[in-house]
Amino acid sequence: HFFCPLKGVISQAYNAVSHPYIDITAPQGSVVKAVLDGTVIYSGWSEDFGHTIQIQHEGDIISIYKHNESLLKKTGEKVTAGSPIALVGNTGDLTTGTHLHLELWHKGNAVDPSKYINF
């Protein structure tokens, strides 16, 4: 049972070849929430993706949230599904506007978040 990380509009859908993640537009500063219980395995900055947070979940699942305005959790912290982890932003070089870039990985393969989450 996945928790919806953000109420917004999917501006770019998942495409296994060209866009293996989804983009969700929402107002700057909207709260981003964890999709499942887990442990933060990365919380930091990248030039390309801005403020990024990655969470390891049970069942060999990883969720990744990019382009955030700020991060609310640090590496090593435990999170519960639905708990605030970041604020929506427009950070990093590879962004064209305020949105959440959401990736979902299972056993090292990208999967379509919209197959598991009601947006």
Image (cartoon, rainbow, N blue to C red):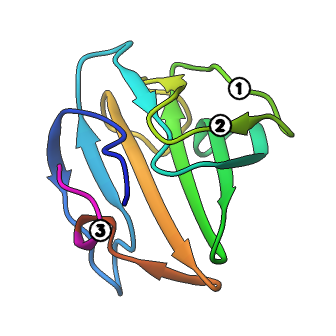
Report the front residue among 37 and 56: 37
What secondary structure is found at the residue carrying circle 1?
Answer: loop
Other residues around mark 3 within 10 Å, as few (<14) / some (14–19) / many (≥20): some
Query: Which residues make up the magenta segment?
Result: 115-119
**Quick check: is 37 in the magenta stretch?**
no
Q: Earlier in the sequence, mark 2 or mark 3?
A: 2
Q: Residue at x 65, y 37 (%)?
A: 79
Work out whether residue 75 can be spotted: yes
Q: Earlier in the sequence, mark 2 or mark 1?
A: 1
Other residues around mark 1 within 10 Å, as few (<14) / some (14–19) / many (≥20): some
**Residue flagged by tag 1: what amino acid is it?**
Lys
**Residue flagged by tag 3: what amino acid is it?**
Tyr
What secondary structure is found at the residue carrying circle 3?
Answer: loop
Evaluate if marks 2 and 1 touch, with contact meaning CB atoms under 8 Å apart.
Answer: yes
Q: Is residue 2 above or below residue 48?
A: below
Where residue 88 sits, quadrant-wise, is top left
Q: Which residue is mark 1?
A: 73
Q: Is residue 9 above or below residue 113?
A: above
For the stretch drawn in magenta, what is the main secondary structure?
Answer: loop
Q: Residue at x 68, y 39 (%)?
A: 47
Residue 98: percent from left, percent from top? 32, 27
Q: Earlier in the sequence, mark 1 or mark 3?
A: 1
Where residue 117 sits, quadrant-wise, is bottom left
Q: Which residue is mark 2?
A: 79
Left or right position of 41 against 105: right
Marks 2 and 3 sit apart, C-alpha to C-alpha, by: 19 Å
Left or right position of 63 against 7: right
Residue 41: percent from left, percent from top? 79, 50
Q: Which residue is mark 3?
A: 116
Residue 48: percent from left, percent from top? 61, 45
Mark number displayed over residue 112: none
